[in-house]
């Protein structure tokens, strides 16, 4: 009896150890059906032995992980080898946590599997940390590669839900931030039910419809840990609860200047009060959302720049083209006018067919002057007449151009090294025209680097000022130009490029001269060329 009592006591101690240990312990038959689970499993899942035994335990696996775990488990049974798998298991309250599931077979002397023994270890904190880092990396990569704002915010919502667990999330844009950048979207979410978005979330920025968001827009985070006990916003709370949510957090998404860009809304399926760690994560997600939204609308300040500069390029090119045509055509037109006047005088003398000659000469003179007048008016339209002048920050103007071209230059393997002078005085001019000049100089430098293979391709852009003027230089280490070409570089239709039109530098110098500035070129000591523009200081600095 003593041995039997000792055995029972030992079994009891073993059972207590198995039941009170930090993880789940289980055993299956050779076919994989569970025949034992420790008490920790039942306490966590809320299942009974009758519900969990056999393959009933699989109902606790997260739907997104169930198929993968099932395939892995079948493969393990066929291989008779130990293995491990990561999956989420549902807690009794509906929340899911990540577990590392390990399984080891027990075999007889013939190598046949008798049982499988396993243990599940809670790795939720570690796993969510991994997912958070990888998710943040994906979001940042999407920002860097210029993905659309709805895609970026949708991915961010997935990161939010993966890091916090047991929730659905959405980012509601402020009315001023909707429109072209997000294709009129008001709420971006992967998991919020459409009915909730339609009835509740699209009006989430209306103070009358949703004071919850109104409070968030005032700059304060609002936490409602139990919507059933919240009486201030019954209509909104009813819509949310009808879609299976029991708690809500609304966090303002603010720009770097403090303007409200939208609201990050997180809805929990269980009554929930956020922990300090969750508050820190939510603040981090809100900050990432603000970066994405601001970047998207900055890309739209960049698209406008592209449009403005393209317009100026077209007008400037047409102006240079018209000026050249006028120069060429005015010579024969002047001859027509001179000859017609001479003909008129000669035929005015006798003997001649005075009436016929005079009529013909008058038509020649009339048509000649008409053609000259057309060209004169056309030249006046695009001549160097005064432009709308303003005080311009040359550093900011250059930065806009560099930002505009950076992606293309990187694709071509060209590095840009800008050096901007500190406290650079402002100049007087037209910002868009100056951007056109700088753009043309950088593109020319890029063209000069295309054939370079024996050294790094580099463009240096630097600004500085002296007592009377502000300067900007674009320097490259490309092919440069022949000294014999220097005098003609800025002539209209003169080009050293196979596919060039010879317009860009001519237009650029015309723009600079219209602003009382200068543009000149020089060869570098080793490789490439430097083009330097000079502009007088704005009147306020003289």
Image (cartoon, rainbow, N blue to C red):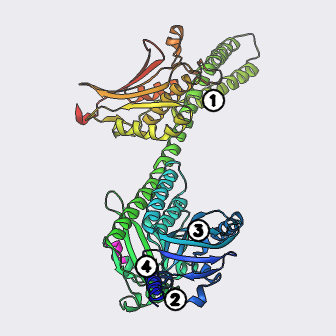
Residue 431: where, in percent of width, then height?
Answer: 40, 39
Judging by the rendered image, the residue that carries numbered circle 2 is 242
Residue 484: where, in percent of width, then height?
Answer: 53, 7
**How far apart in space, not on screen, are marks 4 and 3 (Cα)?**
19 Å
Judging by the rendered image, the residue that carries numbered circle 1 is 370
Judging by the rendered image, the residue that carries numbered circle 4 is 17
Using the image as rendered, state which of residue 160 and residue 150 is in the foreground: 160
Disc number lying in front (4 or 3): 4
Using the image as rendered, state which of residue 375 and residue 527 is in the foreground: 527
Determine if the magenta segment contains residue 376. Answer: no
SS label for mark 3: strand
**How far apart in space, not on screen, are marks 1 and 3 (Cα)?**
97 Å
**How far apart in space, not on screen, are marks 4 and 2 (Cα)?**
44 Å
**How far apart in space, not on screen, are marks 1 and 2 (Cα)?**
79 Å
Judging by the rendered image, the residue that carries numbered circle 3 is 103
Image: 238 above or below 528: below
């Amino acid at each position: 009896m003593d041995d039997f009592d000792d055995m029972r006591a030992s079994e009891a101690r073993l059972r207590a150890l198995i039941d009170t240990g930090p993880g789940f312990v289980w055993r299956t038959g050779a076919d994989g059906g569970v025949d034992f689970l420790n008490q920790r499993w039942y306490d966590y899942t809320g299942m009974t032995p009758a519900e969990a035994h056999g393959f009933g335990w699989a109902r606790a696996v997260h739907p997104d992980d169930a198929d993968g775990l099932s395939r892995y488990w079948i493969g393990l049974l066929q291989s008779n080898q130990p293995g491990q798998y990561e999956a989420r298991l549902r807690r009794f309250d509906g929340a899911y946590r990540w577990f590392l599931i390990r399984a080891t077979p027990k075999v007889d002397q013939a190598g046949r599997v008798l049982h499988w023994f396993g243990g599940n270890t809670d790795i939720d904190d570690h796993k969510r940390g991994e997912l958070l880092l990888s998710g943040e990396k994906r979001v940042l990569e999407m920002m860097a590669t210029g993905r659309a704002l709805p895609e970026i915010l949708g991915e961010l919502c997935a990161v939010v839900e993966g890091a916090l667990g047991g929730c659905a999330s959405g980012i509601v844009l402020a009315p001023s931030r909707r429109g072209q950048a997000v294709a009129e979207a008001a709420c971006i979410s992967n998991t919020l039910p459409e009915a909730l978005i339609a009835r509740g979330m699209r009006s989430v920025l209306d103070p009358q419809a949703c004071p919850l968001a109104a409070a968030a827009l005032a700059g304060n985070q609002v936490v409602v840990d139990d919507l059933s006990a919240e009486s201030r916003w019954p209509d909104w709370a009813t819509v949310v609860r009808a879609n299976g949510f029991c708690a809500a957090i609304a966090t303002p998404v603010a720009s770097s200047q403090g303007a409200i860009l939208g609201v990050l809304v997180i809805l929990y399926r269980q009554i929930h009060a956020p922990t300090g760690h969750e508050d820190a994560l939510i603040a981090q997600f809100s900050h990432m959302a603000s970066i994405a939204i601001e970047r998207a609308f900055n890309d739209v300040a960049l698209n406008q720049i592209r449009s403005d500069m393209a317009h100026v390029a077209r007008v400037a090119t047409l102006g240079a083209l018209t000026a050249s045509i006028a120069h060429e055509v005015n010579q024969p037109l002047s001859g027509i006018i001179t000859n017609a006047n001479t003909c008129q005088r000669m035929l005015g003398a006798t003997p001649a067919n005075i009436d016929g000659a005079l009529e013909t000469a008058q038509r020649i003179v009339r048509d000649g002057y008409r053609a000259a007048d057309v060209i004169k008016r056309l030249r006046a339209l695009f001549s160097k007449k005064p432009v709308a002048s303003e005080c311009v920050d040359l550093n900011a103007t250059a930065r806009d151009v560099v930002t505009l071209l950076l992606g293309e230059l990187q694709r071509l393997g060209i590095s840009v090294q800008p050096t901007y002078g500190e406290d650079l005085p402002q100049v007087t001019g037209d910002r868009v025209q100056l951007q056109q000049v700088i753009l043309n100089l950088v593109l020319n430098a890029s063209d000069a680097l295309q054939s370079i293979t024996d050294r790094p391709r580099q463009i240096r852009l630097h600004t500085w000022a002296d007592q009377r003027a502000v300067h900007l230089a674009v320097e490259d280490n490309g092919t440069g130009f022949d000294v014999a070409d220097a005098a003609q570089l800025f002539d209209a239709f003169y080009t050293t490029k196979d596919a060039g039109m010879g317009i860009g530098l001519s237009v650029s110098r015309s723009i600079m001269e219209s602003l009382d500035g200068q543009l000149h070129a020089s060869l570098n000591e080793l490789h490439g060329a430097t083009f330097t523009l000079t502009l007088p200081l704005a009147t306020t600095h003289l």
